[in-house]
Image (cartoon, rainbow, N blue to C red):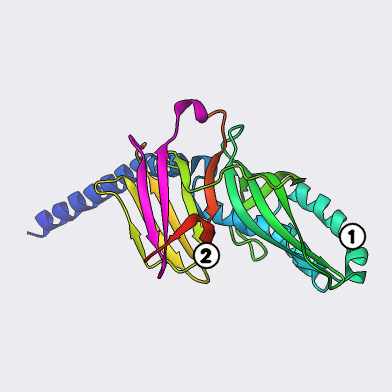
């Protein structure tokens, strides 16, 4: 009996060793499959996290006042990659005395974020900026920032996991790239709509492939995404207490993918809504 027990133990040990070796041989394939799936899902940074970073960066880059210019802009520079940060820090050092001597306050609001056709990771922020100087009457103007997103390690100064790079900016005439509430939608590309009121209900067409997520803090934000290309226009209705917003999402034309910008964030106003009787 002792001999058979010893033989059984030996076979159990051999079986355990073979199992461990088998799993070790298979592990790279499993990890490779997971990594490939994640890489495909993350291609072009088509995630809501990337959109939220782009919004945060754009508004902070254009918002400051005389009392906190250096502190806030140095903090914002950590949202840039190393080369762009060095350029921005030099600009801050050059401007800080001039701005701190004057009573200046500037506030920026992101109106539209566009995904540009020339690169999978390049975006354009269109902002409304309000500038007050010397306690006088505010003046408004529109500005545009073009930049690319690059993955980065998260840090205390930049918890997003993204950096902005290849930055350019310009004051524009204020014309909107897209007005109204009709938007082209691409399969796999996220869209974020911001509302000036608290959304209480979202109405979707039956059997639609569009998926939505509603969050409400100081304003309501509606995340939209579809895994499948739309075959026909889809109407989404978002309702506040006494206002309703009707958005039409249309299939993106194949010719537009490589030639036209795609809206991935839009800030709506009450003018885009209708009053509920």
Query: Mark 2 and mark 1 in contact (Cβ < 8 Å)?
Result: no
Q: Is residue 103 left or right of residue 203?
A: right
Disc 2 designates what residue? Answer: 196
Residue 269 falls in image quadrant: bottom right
Measured as percent of width and height from the top left, residue 260 is found at: 56, 32
Mark linked to residue 95: 1
User: Taking the image as drawn, is residue 69 in sight?
Assistant: yes
Measured as percent of width and height from the top left, residue 64 is found at: 76, 66
Measured as percent of width and height from the top left, residue 268 is found at: 53, 56
Residue 252 part of the magenta-drawn span: yes
Q: Is residue 160 left or right of residue 74?
A: left
What secondary structure is found at the residue carrying circle 1? helix
Q: CA distance from mark 1 to mark 2?
A: 34 Å
Look at 18% across and 55% down and name the residue there.
9
Q: What is the span of residues highlighted in magenta in the rendered image?
A: 230-256
Viewer-closest of 117 and 218: 218
The local crowd at label 2, few if under 14, some if 14 to 19, many if 20 or more residues have their Cα within 10 Å, is: some
């Amino acid at each position: 009996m002792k001999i058979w027990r010893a033989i059984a133990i030996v076979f159990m040990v051999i079986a355990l060793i073979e199992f461990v070796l088998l799993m070790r041989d298979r592990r790279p394939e499993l990890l490779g499959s997971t990594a490939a799936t994640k890489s495909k899902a993350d291609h072009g940074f088509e995630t809501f996290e990337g959109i939220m970073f782009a919004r945060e960066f754009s508004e902070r880059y254009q918002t400051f006042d005389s009392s906190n210019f250096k502190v806030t802009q140095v903090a914002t520079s950590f949202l840039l990659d190393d080369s762009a940060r060095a350029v921005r820090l030099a600009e801050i050092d050059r401007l800080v005395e001039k701005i701190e001597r004057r009573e200046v306050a500037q506030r920026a609001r992101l109106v539209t974020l566009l995904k540009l056709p020339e690169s999978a990771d390049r975006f354009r922020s269109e902002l409304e900026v309000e500038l007050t100087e010397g306690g006088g009457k505010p003046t408004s103007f529109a500005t545009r920032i073009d930049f690319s997103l690059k993955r980065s390690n998260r840090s205390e100064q930049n918890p997003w996991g993204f950096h902005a790079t290849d930055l350019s900016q310009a004051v524009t005439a204020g014309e909107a790239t897209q007005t109204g509430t009709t938007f082209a939608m691409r399969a796999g590309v996220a869209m974020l709509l911001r509302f000036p009121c608290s959304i209480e209900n979202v109405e979707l067409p039956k059997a639609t492939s569009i998926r939505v997520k509603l969050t409400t803090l100081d304003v309501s934000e509606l995340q939209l995404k579809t895994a499948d290309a739309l075959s026909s226009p889809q109407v989404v209705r978002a309702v506040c207490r006494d206002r309703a917003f009707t958005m039409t999402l249309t299939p993106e034309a194949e010719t537009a993918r490589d030639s036209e910008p795609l809206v991935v964030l839009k800030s709506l106003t009450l003018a885009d809504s209708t009053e509920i009787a």
